[in-house]
Image (cartoon, rainbow, N blue to C red):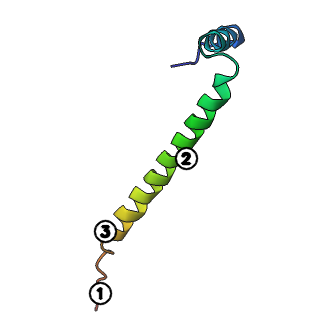
Amino acid sequence: MFKNLGAFELLIIVAIVLLLFGGKKIPELMKGLGRGMHEFKKASEGAHTDEAAATPPPAQTTDTK
């Protein structure tokens, strides 16, 4: 999706973000984004452990010949 973005395009995007939010607001936005990603990761890991705990182990078969 973003394969064609070069350095110049990224520079323009950064300049627009700076103009929209200002220099002081960006660290706060990034901090909030980091917290949100951390919470999402924690919730995602919790869902995996809940799923693993809810799934019974596979039945063991004894093969007697």
Residue 65 sits above or below residue 9 on the image: below
Query: Disc number at residue 54?
Result: 3
Determine whether label 2 and label 3 are within 8 Å by CB.
no
Left or right for 53, reference 22: left
Work out whether residue 14 or residue 3 is closer to the camera in this orientation and state it. Answer: 14
In this figure, which residue is indicated by the disc labeled 1?
Answer: 63
Q: Nearer the viewer, mark 1 or mark 3?
A: 3
Q: Secondary structure at mark 2?
A: helix
Instruction: Report the amino acid beneath label 3.
Output: Ala
Q: Give the CA separation, mark 2 to mark 1.
A: 47 Å
Work out whether residue 9 or residue 27 is closer to the camera in this orientation and state it. Answer: 27
Of labels 2 and 3, earlier in sequence is 2
In this figure, which residue is indicated by the disc labeled 2?
Answer: 38
Work out whether residue 36 or residue 28 is closer to the camera in this orientation and state it. Answer: 28
Of labels 2 and 1, earlier in sequence is 2
Looking at the picture, how far across and down is residue 26, in whole percent? 65, 24
Looking at the picture, how far across and down is residue 8, in whole percent? 70, 8
Looking at the picture, how far across and down is residue 13, in whole percent? 62, 12
Q: Nearer the viewer, mark 2 or mark 1?
A: 2
Which of the 4 quarters of the picture holds residue 49? bottom left
Residue 56 sits above or below residue 45 on the image: below
Q: Nearer the viewer, mark 2 or mark 3?
A: 2
Q: Secondary structure at mark 3?
A: helix
Left or right for 2, reference 45: right
